[in-house]
Image (tube, helix red, strand yellow):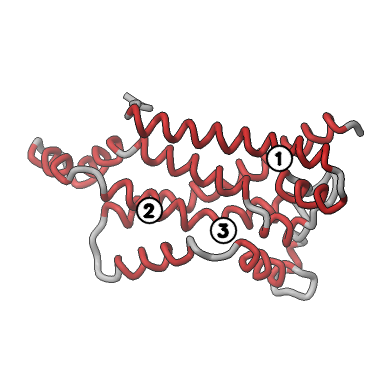
Amino acid sequence: MGVETEIIEISLRALIVSGSATLLAAVFGIPIGVFLGLKRFRGRSVIKGFFNSLMGMPAVSLGLVLYLLWSRSGPLGFLHLLYTPMAMAVGQAALVTPIMVSLVTGTLESVDPEIRDLARTLGASETQASIAVLRESVNGLLLAIIACFNRAIAELGVAFMVGGNIRSVTRVLTTSIALETTKGELALGIGLTAVLLVIAFALNAMVHFVQKRGIPLVD
């Protein structure tokens, strides 16, 4: 396999794994974030603090926990997830879900309260008023998804611990860069680093552009 072909294969796998992880995080994280952002109830601040604290969890620590759960002698070993792309996607999803929850919650909290009050004044139900707030937050929700994908594709600890960096199976950009650098194969390592940086810079530029211009992503 040539260097160019291997770079393309590894890059596509990284995009698929991290894209799947971001989708999983969105499925679970956005509803939780919406609930925390729109509802007021006892214990809400405790739950928010819990997710905020999880944002600081080291990726390698999470990877170790998942490894122990999915190893052959672990309680979930019967799932045979360890050293598969699915394990990497689930692990990355677990890593970025707290980020998704916190960003979505913060986005909804930043919406002007008068929007909800105005909707109620015009005769909207509580559900319709919440939908009005969500419409005002769409840009922020999409930015949260982009930020989580950026974090997922750039992480190393979880991908290495539960993926094993198996060639043509679980090898992705970050694990490949670490391996090739250790082996002294700088050409492939530099190529993979360039791809990762391009993806990261493109996503960051997109976030910055949307935030600066205030582009309406939906009507």
Which label lies toward us, 3 or 1?
1
201 vs 16, left or right, is left
Gap between marks 2 and 1 measured at Cα? 33 Å
Q: Quadrant of the N terminus?
A: top right
Q: Amino acid at mark 2?
A: Gly
**Which of the 4 image quadrants contains residue 45?**
bottom left
Q: Amino acid at mark 3?
A: Ala
Residue sitting at 32 percent across and 29 percent down?
Answer: 214
Question: Callout 2 environment at 10 Å: few (<14), some (14 to 19), or many (20+)?
Answer: many
Point out residue 143 in the picture as x, y percentages from the top left corner. 43, 39
Residue sitting at 32 percent across and 57 percent down?
Answer: 36
- Give the secondary structure at mark 2: helix
Q: Residue furthest right?
A: 1
Which residue was labeled with disc 3?
94
Gap between marks 3 and 1 measured at Cα? 24 Å
Q: Are marks 3 and 1 in contact (CB under 8 Å)?
A: no
Query: Viewer-proximal residue, 46 or 117?
Result: 46
Point out residue 64 in the picture as x, y percentages from the top left corner. 68, 69
Q: Amino acid at mark 1?
A: Thr
- Give the secondary structure at mark 3: helix
81 vs 124, left or right, is right
User: In the displayed structure, would residue 60 be above or below residue 96?
Assistant: below
**Which of the 4 image quadrants contains residue 209?**
top left
Which residue was labeled with disc 1?
193
Residue sitting at 56 percent across and 48 percent down?
Answer: 151
Which residue was labeled with disc 2?
33
Residue sitting at 76 percent across and 67 percent down?
Answer: 78
- Give the secondary structure at mark 1: helix
Which label lies toward us, 2 or 1?
1
Gap between marks 2 and 3 measured at Cα? 15 Å
